Image (cartoon, grey):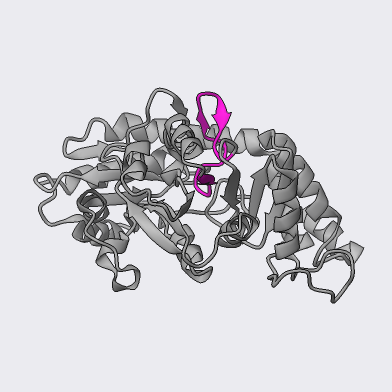
Amino acid sequence: MSDLKKIPWAKPEFWGNEQQYVVEALASSWISGGPFVDRFETEFAKYTGSRYAVTASNGTTALHMAFLGLGVRPGDEVIVPGFGFLAAANVALHVGAKPVFAEVDPSTWCVTAKSIEANISARTKVVVPIHTYGNVCGMDEIITLASERSIWVVEDAAEALASHYKGRLAGTMGTIGTYSFQATKTISTGEGGMVVTGDLELDKRMRLYRNHGMLKTRYWHEVVGHNFRLTNLQAALGCAQLEKIDRIISERRRVHEEYQVRLSKIPGLFLQHFPSEVDPVLWAIAVRLDPSAYPAGRDKVMEMLAVEGIETRPGFYPPSVMDLYSCPKLPICEQLSRQILSLPTYPTLSEKEIDFICSKLSKLMR
């Protein structure tokens, strides 16, 4: 691939005090819980404007804490989009609830209030809007609908930290918001997650479930809890990353803008649509390939880009194509899954690399 090295799909970056803070955590002997955990929660709550923030071992356990805090039980139904990472659906199954899958909008690739409403039943307990790739669902309509039906809203903002909807941060509009700090995410602790809420009782219950169900007395279990704790070492990374969030956002916006300029000139590609009320900070740049322009298919395009040293990822597989979920057909989600290609996206991706990626993608057209 000429003078360029292999371009990975994602790459974690360190911006300042990561090494210093991790060494401080090691030297303190607090390597499990500790001061950096408390600091990370306090600073994240301040950043998001939330009253309470609770760290978790990853974004999936953040969702698990949310469901347990809300009392999701066997027989309850949880509505989730059929296109998106299926962590919320898997957690619903783990707590004995039934995930019910809603279609998504074919242009934004996000779930809508209309598709949610079509799937509400007397057993619906929670709806989980997933802000896929960094877009943000139409939260005003979703929250209004959920409020009218007495349904909880848990925002899965794992891919949308720093994205805004009508000036409000993704993850702060529902009953609970969840975030992921996995290695590819906007800020990273390797693995890690966070829940935010404005409800004191929810905050208390989620902390209880996070720590084996122990409240004040060690080894005395109030509920059947789990170990969802984030380590002090990981929280040290999170504190350092959060200090540089403005720079990270700026660089991700640059990458998005440079891709947008180049990709919009290539016929046969459809970019994810961002409504005017959404100000996105993208976790990943994704395009939908028109089959008439790329008749070999998305998977073949991925193979050919890999030969050029460009790592890509497919769209999310919908539950309707996996026996595990017993899900009816979801035509829109299935089409998106077959046609979406996710391109390398990280803050230090260079203009030269973006040029190279878009040039190769263009040359693979029919």
Q: Residue at x 29, y 40 (%)?
A: 105
Give the percent coordinates (x, y) of residue 155: 52, 45
User: Observer-nearest residue: 356 or 346?
Assistant: 346
**Residue 243 higher or lower than 13, as above or below:** above
- Residue ranking furthest to the bottom: 219
Is residue 195 rendered to the left or right of residue 272?
A: right
Using residue 359 as the reference point, say whether residue 165 is left or right of it. Answer: right
Horizontal side of 42 relative to 5 (left or right) equals right
Residue 156 colored in magenta in the image: yes
Res 255 quadrant in image: top left
Vertically, is 73 above or below 156? Answer: below
In this view of the protein, which residue sits in the foreground, 264 or 194?
A: 194
Q: Is residue 180 visible?
A: yes
Location of residue 43 in the rendering, given as x and y in whole percent from the top left corner: 76, 41
Q: Residue at x 47, y 32 (%)?
A: 144
62 or 160, which is in the foreground? Answer: 62
Residue 182 in view of the camera:
no
Q: Position of residue 258 (x, y in %)?
A: 39, 32
Give the farthest residue toward the front: 122
Residue at image x 29%, y 42%? Answer: 358
Report how many numbered discs are placed on residues in the image. Answer: 0
Q: Is residue 359 above or below residue 223?
A: above
The quadrant the N terminus occupies is bottom left
Q: Which residues are magenta?
A: 151-171
